[in-house]
Image: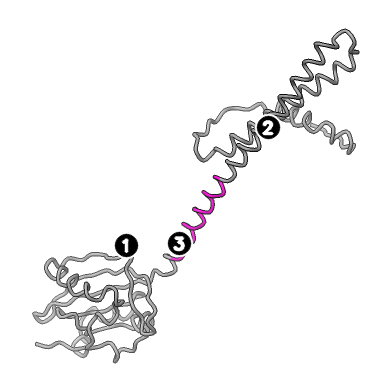
Amino acid sequence: MNITRKDFEDIPFKTALEAAPNAMIITNDKGIIVFINKQTELLFGYSEDELLGKSIEILVPPAYRDQHPKDRGQFYNKPTPRKTGIGRDLHGLRKDLKEIAVEIGLAPIELSGEKFVISSIIDISARVKAEKNLKDKSIELEKSNAELEQFAYIASHDLQAPLRHITSYVQLLNKELEDQLSDKTKQWMGFVTAGAKRMQELINGLLSFSRLSRVEIDFKLLNFNQIVEDSLLNLSQSIKESGVIFKI
């Protein structure tokens, strides 16, 4: 028996196939298209008359066309419902020769003693494009993080040397001129040493921050009063010059 498109007019699930949001195609055991719904026309750009009676390979890109009959044969050898295209590249070919990324669900059916396959086809081109963009952004972010870490390492190395010199010279001055320094001068010297120490801590913090993606984050309780006091001390000169008054 040779079942045609007209024979599918009265099948119980025809209405469901027509109303499906996906492209739905029915082929016989030779791979000949015997039914399509409107979504198939929209997805592939062919009219119903252009596809009925044609081989399903018309919708397969040339690069995969020779392999496709073998894949169909394997399905008929073990005809169980399955999805294809998940986790690998699978493409369909439109009438305008544009390739589209797709996922396909296959299900065997039997009508009047003949075997057929229902194919449900989803266009995932937008998803594939979004995933590629996400992957590209992830690569860019990794590159940016690597550059940031390299910069932080170089900056910390270049900045730490002058700070060590400042601290060392202040200590030498304190030692050499201990008896000649006034209390006010000693206080100023202390400010220089404390400032250098705070700068060293900031540099180390920058270096640690740049490595956050590679180390395990250690959460701990912090004394925010102390953090505020340290911040005000770090900004003391700017605060003094601007005349800003903080109320905490």
Gap in Å between the C-alphas at discs 2 and 3?
Answer: 38 Å
Q: Which amino acid is tagged 1? A: Arg
Mark count: 3
Circle 1/circle 3 CB separation < 8 Å: no
Circle 2/circle 3 CB separation < 8 Å: no
Determine the image quadrant of residue 226. top right
- What residue sits right under mark 1 in the picture? 88
Task: Classify mark 1: helix, strand or loop.
Answer: loop
Q: 2 left or right of 21?
A: left
Q: Earlier in the sequence, mark 1 or mark 3?
A: 1
Most common secondary structure along the magenta stretch:
helix
Gap in Å between the C-alphas at discs 1 and 3?
Answer: 13 Å
Placement of the C terminus among the 4 image quadrants: top right
Task: Classify mark 2: helix, strand or loop.
Answer: helix
Q: Percent position (x, y) of residue 53?
A: 22, 88
Local packing at callout 3 (Cα closer than 10 Å; few below 14, some 14-19, many 20+) is few
Q: Report the front residue among 128 and 214.
A: 214
Q: Which residues are magenta?
A: 129-146
- The label on residue 132 is 3
Residue 134: in magenta span: yes
- What residue sits right under mark 2 in the picture? 202
Q: Percent position (x, y) of residue 172?
A: 78, 15
Q: Percent position (x, y) of residue 243?
A: 90, 36
Q: Earlier in the sequence, mark 2 or mark 1?
A: 1
Q: Which amino acid is tagged 2? A: Leu
Q: Which amino acid is tagged 3? A: Lys
- The label on residue 149 is none
